[in-house]
């Protein structure tokens, strides 16, 4: 009986490990005209972003590489709405921005550091 219980405990612990090791989503709040938080540091791999638009106008969400190339984009996040997006990234520095005309220039840009 003890041996059978040990096998069950080992299976439960081993089976639960991926859930315990999954990184939490990065929650970003969009308002006029900023991201909160502005600068984010994450671990390399698949990153889940949850973007909440608490502003009164439409925003979007773009992850760009060091050369300004868009790697992932959510085209429209309406006021009061939440979007979730996943992107796989290697270690490096990236930019997060809202590219709705005038928003980046007004300060809606941040740094994403992937380690």
Image (cartoon, rainbow, N blue to C red):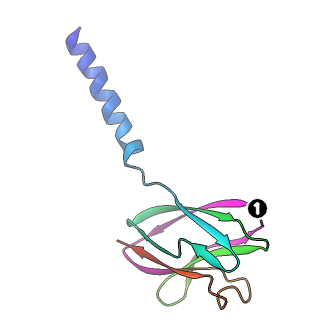
Q: Tell me the magenta residue range.
A: 73-95
In the image, 67: left or right of 106? left
Asked if residue 80 lies in the magenta stretch, the reply is: yes
Residue located 49% across and 90% down the image: 67
Asked if residue 78 lies in the magenta stretch, the reply is: yes
Q: Which residue is mark 1?
A: 80
Q: Residue furthest top?
A: 1
Question: Eyeballing the image, is 65 above or below 91?
Answer: below
Q: Position of residue 42 (x, y in %)?
A: 41, 67
Residue located 76% across and 61% down the image: 80
Residue 69 found in image quarter: bottom right
Q: Position of residue 100 (x, y in %)?
A: 73, 83
Quarter of the figure with the C terminus:
bottom left
Nearer the observer, 76 or 11: 76
In the image, 57: left or right of 38? right
Q: Position of residue 90 (x, y in %)?
A: 39, 72
Question: Eyeballing the image, is 41 above or below 80?
Answer: below
Nearer the observer, 26 or 45: 26
Secondary-structure class at tag 1: loop
Residue located 51% across and 57% down the image: 25
Question: Eyeballing the image, is 71 above or below 86?
Answer: below
């Amino acid at each position: 009986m003890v041996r059978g219980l040990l096998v069950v405990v080992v299976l439960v612990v081993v089976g639960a490990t991926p859930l315990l090791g999954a990184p939490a989503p990065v929650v970003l709040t969009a308002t006029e005209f900023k991201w909160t938080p502005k600068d984010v540091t994450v671990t390399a791999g698949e990153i889940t972003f949850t973007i909440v638009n608490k502003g009164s106008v439409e925003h979007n969400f773009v992850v760009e590489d060091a050369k300004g190339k868009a790697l992932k984009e959510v085209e429209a996040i309406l006021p009061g709405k939440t979007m979730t997006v996943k992107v796989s990234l290697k270690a490096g520095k990236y930019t997060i921005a809202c590219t709705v005309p005038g928003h980046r220039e007004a300060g809606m840009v941040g740094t994403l550091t992937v380690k």
